[in-house]
Image (cartoon, rainbow, N blue to C red):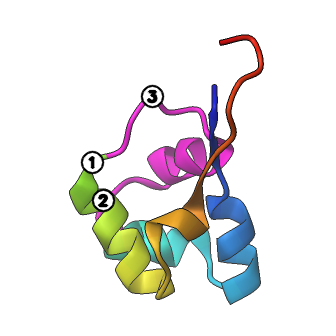
Amino acid sequence: MPIIVKLDVVIADRKVKSKDLAEFVDITEANMSLLKQGKVKGIRFDTLLRICEYLQCQPGDILKYTPDSKD
């Protein structure tokens, strides 16, 4: 997958607890864990907005595009 989720890095940099972020975003801790691991196929813009709001970051701080050499 050419999209890398760097949410775990941003959370660690900001010294934020995943539990607190999940509560603010209004998703379960299990879904936050899946999102942090990049094991999701998509994310709602509203969810991305709330994450960026809480972490005071840009979407590009959380998501990175890396072209696949096989494509």
Q: Does the magenta stretch include residue 29?
A: yes
On the image, numbered disc 2 is attached to which residue?
47
Q: Are marks 1 and 3 in contact (CB under 8 Å)?
A: no
Q: Would you say 60 lies left or right of 12 here?
A: left
- Mark 2 vs 3, N-terminal side: 3
Q: Which of 1 and 16 is in front in this view?
A: 1
Task: Tell me, yes or no, if residue 67 can be seen here.
Answer: yes
State whether residue 60 is above or below residue 21.
Answer: above
Q: Where is residue 45 in the image (x, y as percent from the top left)?
A: 25, 55
Inter-mark Cα distance, 2 to 3: 14 Å
Where the C terminus falls, by quadrant?
A: top right
Residue 44 is marked as 1
Please name the residue shown 39% across and 35% down the image. Answer: 42
Residue 1 sits inside the magenta stretch:
no
Q: Which amino acid does label 3 sit on?
A: Lys
Query: On the rendered image, what quadrant is the N terminus found in?
Result: top right
* Most foreground residue, 39 or 24: 39
The secondary structure type at the circle numbered 1 is loop
Residue name at image x 45 percent, y 28 percent = 41
Q: Residue 15, percent across and down?
A: 71, 87
Q: Residue 41 carries which label?
A: 3
User: What residue range appears in magenta?
Assistant: 25-43
Query: Which is nearer the eye, 58 or 16?
Result: 58
Three-letter amino acid code at the position of disc 1: Arg
